Image (cartoon, rainbow, N blue to C red):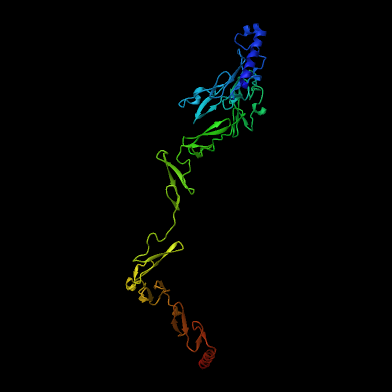
Amino acid sequence: MNRWVVRFIVALLLTTVTNASDPLSARQTDSGCPNPEVRMCQYVTCANGGQCREIDAARCFTCDCKVGFTGAMCETKEEISNRTHICEFGPCQHGGICLPFNNDFLCQCPPFTTGRYCEQTVASNPCESSPCLNSGTCIIKNNTFECICTSQYTGYQCEINQATSDQCSFSTCFNGGTCYTSGNATYCYCPTETTGRYCEERLPLNPCISSPCYSDGTCILNNGNFKCLCSADRTGEFCEKYSVFHPCASVPCLNNAHCFGVNNNTDFYCYCGYDRTGRFCEQEIVYNPCASSPCLNDGSCITVNDTFRCECAPAMTGYYCELNRTLDLCRFSPCYNNGTCYTIKQDHVGCICPSKTTGYYCEEVLNESNECDSCLNGGTCLQHNNSYTCVCPSNFSGENCELINQSQGKVIFHLLLVSIIIVL
C-alpha cells in the first residue's frame, strides 16, 4: 500500500477520534477543524510534491498540488490538452499572475510572497507593529511601510513636531540623503540607487538593464534575478541557441561558417567567407593566379608564389606577352624632352638625351643655372653631367681660378713699386 494512502488513513482516524471525543466542539465550530491544536501536516504527506497546509475545515488540512495533479492528496494526474495552456489551471498562489512561457509558465508574485508558485511568504505585514507615531497612518509600499503624518508632524515615522523643532536637526534622511526644508516641510535629496520620501528604499539592481538576452529575447524580472523569454526559434538561458525546430539548430555549416535561417526559417544558408564554398562551406577555395588567363597571344601562365609569370611565344614579349618582337618599339616615342630612341635586342629601348636632361627616358631636367660663370680670371669651363671644371691660366689657380700664383704676385708687386717711383 502506498505511503501517502497510509498517512491519509491515519489522518482520517485522528480526525474521527477527535470528533468522537469532543462532539460539542464539532457542533460549535460547524465545518471548522474540530481540534486546531493537532498539527495534521505532521502526519500527512501529499503525493507528487504537493504541499500540506493546515486549514480551519473539517479535515483540518488540504494539499496544494503542483500543476498537472489533483485529488485530496494530489494523487491524480490531470490530462492537459495540447491546446490548453497551464496558466488556465491557475497554478500561481496568493494572487500571483501566471505568465505563459513557451510550454511552461512563470508566476509574477505579489508583495511578501515568492517561490515558483508564489507559495512562500517572505515577510509579515510591516504595518502590524504600528511603526507610525503621533497618529500617523501606515501604508504598505514596495514591501515596506510609509507613514502619512498629520499636519503637525513629519519624519520617517512622524516623530518630529514641526512647531517646536528644527526638522533637519534630526537627520531624517537615510542612506546618505541630504535634508532640506521648504516652508514647514522637510525634503530629502536622495543619492543614486535610493528612493522614497526619506531615501529609505534602496532600488534593486535591475539585471535587465544590461540587456542579457540575445536575438530579441525579452528580459523579465524573476525573484530578484532575470529570465529571458525567447522567440520560438531560440532557446537557452540567454536565447543564445537555436531551438530544435530551427534549421540551424543542427549546426549544418562547417569550418566556422555562419548559419542563417531563410524562407521563414524553413531552410538555411551558410555564409562561408572568402576561402570556402559549397552549401555547407565544405569545399576549400584554392587561389589560382592563372585562373583569369592573364597571358595574351598564346602565352603560357606559370604560378610563382601566389602570383604568375608569362612565358611568351617566340614572336611576342612583354609582361603579359602583349608586345610583338618585330614591332618597332620606338614608334611609341618613349623618350622625353626630345630624347632620341634606339632599339636594344629587339625588345628593349634606350634614349640618347639632349643637353640639360638625364634619366633612362630623359625624364629629368638638369638645373638651368650656368655653373661655368663661376670660373674667374679668364679660366675655361668644362661642363660635366652634374658638375664643371675650371681650366685656369698659368698665373692663376684654385677651383674657380680665384688664386694668384706666388711668382706672379712678386712680379706684380715690383711693377707697382716701379710705377710709384716714376710718378714721384
Q: Work out whether residue 2 can be spotted.
A: yes
Query: Would residue 137 be seen by someone viewing this image from the given angle?
Result: no
Which residue corresponds to the image point at 66% horizontal and 20% vertical from the top-left? 42
In this view, the residue in front, 7 or 57, is: 7
x and y percentages locating residue 210 in the rendered image: 54, 38
Q: Quadrant of the N terminus?
A: top right
Residue 15 lies, with reference to residue 375, above or below; the image says above
Q: Nearer the viewer, residue 399 or 355?
A: 355
In which image quadrant can residue 140 be found?
A: top right
> What is the count of numbered marks?
0
Q: Is residue 345 above or below residue 134?
A: below
Q: Is residue 276 left or right of residue 23?
A: left
Task: Residue at the far front: name it.
Answer: 1
- Measuring 65% from the left and 6% from the top, which residue is drawn there? 23
Q: Which residue occupies the foreground of this view, 399 or 348?
A: 348
In the image, 130: left or right of 382? right
Residue 26 position in % (x across, y down): 63, 8
Q: Quadrant of residue 172?
A: top right
Q: Position of residue 273 (x, y in %)?
A: 45, 50
In this view, the residue in front, 351 or 36, is: 36
Residue 145 pos. (x, y %): 61, 23
